[in-house]
Amino acid sequence: MPQINLLPWRQQERVRTQREFTLAVTAVLMVSAAVTLFTSWGISAAIDRQQERNRLLKHEISELDKQITEIIGLEAEKQRMHARMDVVERLQRSRPEVVHVFDQLARTVPDGVYLTSVKQSDRRLELIGFAQSSTRVSTFMRNIEASQWLADPQLQVIETLKQGRTGADFTLLAMQKSVLADEDQKARRPAGAPGS
């Protein structure tokens, strides 16, 4: 029987298989490295894009915060302006009241009563004067009570004069009626309430 030596063929086959295995392992490693590199690059790019979005959002949020602060400031300024406008309107509407009060004072002062001082503090009037008699002061108080623009007369001081003069010095308090106060009360009264 002839002898066939298969060792070189097996050796070559082993070398070829080992070379193919090495190439396959190298290819798998290279593909794995490429996949890892591209995945890492993709994740890094996604992180960068998200960080850019976050920076943009933070910038926009800070801009909106500034605008909100400005709007709050403008709202406060608007309320102050409305309050000023209300005060100016009230002053405009109450301007004729002073004229009416002085007109009523002139009409309510009876003969024999002379006013030497008129002071006003808010709606309160302090009337200081001289009367020929205390009955004239009483008449003056009744006239104030009947007045359309004055109310609630209160006699503070009355001093009978001595030293040859007849009459009395007096100090009288009265309240000024306000048409505006009546209008404000009517405006504040709910619908259906008595007097509306």
Image: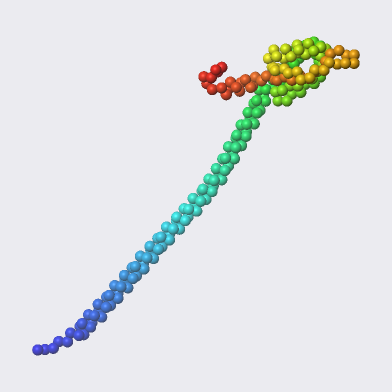
Could you tell whether 175 is left or right of 167 in the image?
Answer: left
- What residue is drawn where x is 61% and y is 23%? 184
Q: How many marks?
A: 0
Task: Pinpoint residue 126: horizontal percent, then vertical percent.
Answer: 76, 21
* Quadrant (top left, top right, bottom left, bottom right) of the N terminus: bottom left
Specify the quadrant of the image occupied by residue 107: top right
Could you tell whether 38 is left or right of 52 in the image?
Answer: left
Could you tell whether 161 is left or right of 40 in the image?
Answer: right
* Quadrant (top left, top right, bottom left, bottom right) of the C terminus: top right
Task: Pinpoint residue 83: horizontal percent, then vertical percent.
Answer: 62, 31
- What residue is drawn where x is 42% and y is 57%? 46
Q: In terms of depth relative to the viewer, which is nearer, 28 or 175?
A: 175
Compared to 1, does 93 lie above or below?
above
Tell me if I can see residue 99 in this picture: no
Q: In terms of depth relative to the viewer, which is nearer, 39 or 105?
A: 105
- What residue is drawn where x is 18% and y is 84%? 6
Specify the quadrant of the image occupied by residue 47: bottom left
Residue reaching furthest to the right: 164
Task: Pinpoint residue 59: horizontal percent, then vertical percent.
Answer: 52, 50
Could you tell whether 146 is left or right of 40 in the image?
Answer: right
Residue reaching furthest to the left: 1
